[in-house]
Image: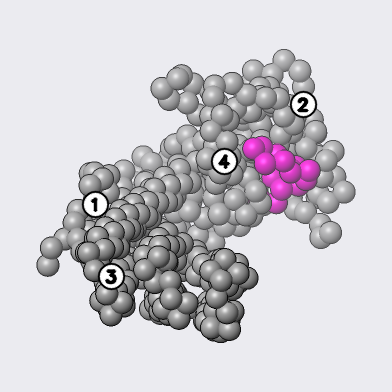
């Protein structure tokens, strides 16, 4: 079989994967040179499905436009030619009814073969009707050639059958015209008119071929671009919190260095006893433990809308109310912290395991991209963040310590134990702290 490589084959196409996860191998979108069909049956089905709605609209539009043309012929033809209207009206009426049936049948054209039957059928019918009309009115020598040429141009440009159908349709135009022309004895004009019909059909067929090839190229490239977009999106979401990734994809300008001031609730958590655990365990065991702990903790954080902005060995930083606004951000952080502790307790780890120490604080911070032009991180910077980190350091293993500002926002729901004003490293002013014990329903 002769095949065509569509030209824009890059190493990217070989590395990419489609949204369903199937890799794009070399030559994944190769086509038969003559029929233009994709060699991959699944890809050909996808193309036909993607082109389905547009093909139906084209078929319906072609039918309705052709109805208008035949109505005009019925109204203008007889007086212009000086012939009795009876035969003209009969042919035009039959053709109009046939085209209206085709327009209605477009709803039935749910597959490519059905669409081809409708499109090719109405063009064949139009050719027969045009030839019959010129014969019965005695105007074939004058209007037979323009009538067939107009029908051919209309069929190729508006109906736009697939290329194999275009070739068959072109042959039908030529044979239909030639069969009538021979019987009418056009003399020396016969070969010239046959040449004109043939040239029109060949030109239109080449145009249909190039148009369909271009359309298939666009479809294949859109598949590749869509798959690569999904791949990048999935990859970003494994390195960035989903809300952050979605924000950057939807608005790339948000990736510029700098930020805006936002009221946040910041959650810091690290594993108490991690150093001791790491001394006794092998590096592989440490990594397995960290992955298991984070695998249990991160889903509950994401379920509350938290944005995990940083992992720091055995510690993690989560922010709420950015990049997506959350009016109840303090309550979300509190629920996350309690759920994290439960999730780690229930995780399938060794009996001796580190547990989270969690600190939570609410206040203003600059949220944005910090770093250099080459590499940057999405972070929250400010005293609010620093205080959350200090509260986490102060928190005993397995406990949650929150600031006064956070407590004021959730006091109607929170069960706490007052811790007074502990001395926190790096803080010149005392801060009221509370241990979060639980949240009441409602």
Q: Nearer the viewer, mark 4 or mark 1?
A: 1
* N-term-proximal mark, 4 vs 1: 1
Q: Residue at x 56, y 44 (%)?
A: 246
Q: Nearer the viewer, mark 2 or mark 1?
A: 1
Compare marks 3 and 2 and give the one earlier in the sequence: 3
Residue drawn 81% across the image and 49% down it: 414
Give whichever of 94, 315 is nearer the camera. 94
Rendered location of residue 168, percent (x, y) = 28, 73
How far separated are the C-alphas under marks 2 and 4? Answer: 39 Å
Q: Which mark is residue 431?
A: 2
Of tags 4 and 3, the one toward the viewer is 3
Q: Which residue is mark 1?
A: 6
Q: Which residue is mark 4?
A: 250
Q: Secondary structure at mark 3?
A: loop
- Is residue 327 a member of the stretch shown in magenta? yes
Residue bearing mark 3: 186
Residue 248: x and y, percent? 54, 37
């Amino acid at each position: 079989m002769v095949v065509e490589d569509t030209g824009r084959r890059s190493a990217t196409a070989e590395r990419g994967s489609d949204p369903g996860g199937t890799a794009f191998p070399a030559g994944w979108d190769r086509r038969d040179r003559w029929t233009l069909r994709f060699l991959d049956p699944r890809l050909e089905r996808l193309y036909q499905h993607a082109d389905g709605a547009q093909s139906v609209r084209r078929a319906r539009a072609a039918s309705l436009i052709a109805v208008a043309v035949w109505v005009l012929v019925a109204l203008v033809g007889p007086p212009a030619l000086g012939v009795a209207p009876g035969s003209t009206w009969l042919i035009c009426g039959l053709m109009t009814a046939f085209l209206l049936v085709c327009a209605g049948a477009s709803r039935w054209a749910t597959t490519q073969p059905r669409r081809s039957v409708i499109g090719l059928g109405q063009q064949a019918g139009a050719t027969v009707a045009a030839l019959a009309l010129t014969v019965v009115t005695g105007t074939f020598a004058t209007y037979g050639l323009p009538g067939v040429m107009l029908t051919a141009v209309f069929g190729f440009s508006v109906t736009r059958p697939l290329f194999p159908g275009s070739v068959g349709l072109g042959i039908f135009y030529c044979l239909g015209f030639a069969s009538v022309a021979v019987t009418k004895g056009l003399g020396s004009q016969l070969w010239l008119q046959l040449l004109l019909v043939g040239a029109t059909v060949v030109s239109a067929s080449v145009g249909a071929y190039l148009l369909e090839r271009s359309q298939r190229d666009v479809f294949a490239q859109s598949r590749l671009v869509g798959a690569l977009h999904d791949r990048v999106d999935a990859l970003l979401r494994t390195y960035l919190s989903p809300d952050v990734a979605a924000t950057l994809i939807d608005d790339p300008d948000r990736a510029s260095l700098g930020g805006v001031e936002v009221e946040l609730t910041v959650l810091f958590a690290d594993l108490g006893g991690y150093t001791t655990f790491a001394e006794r365990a092998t590096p592989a065991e440490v990594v397995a433990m960290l992955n298991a702990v984070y695998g249990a903790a991160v889903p509950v954080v994401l379920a509350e809308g938290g944005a995990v902005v940083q992992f720091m060995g055995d510690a993690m930083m989560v922010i709420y109310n950015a990049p997506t606004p959350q009016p109840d951000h303090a309550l979300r952080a509190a629920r996350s912290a309690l759920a994290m502790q439960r999730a780690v307790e229930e995780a399938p780890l060794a009996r001796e395991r580190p547990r989270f120490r969690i600190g939570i604080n609410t206040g203003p911070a600059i949220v944005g991209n910090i770093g250099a032009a080459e590499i940057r991180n999405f972070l929250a910077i400010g005293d609010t963040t620093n205080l959350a980190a200090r509260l986490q350091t102060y928190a005993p293993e397995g406990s949650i310590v929150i600031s006064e500002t956070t407590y004021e926002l959730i006091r109607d729901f929170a069960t706490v134990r007052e811790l007074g004003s502990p001395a926190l490293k790096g803080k010149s002013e005392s801060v009221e702290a509370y241990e979060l014990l639980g949240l009441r329903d409602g």
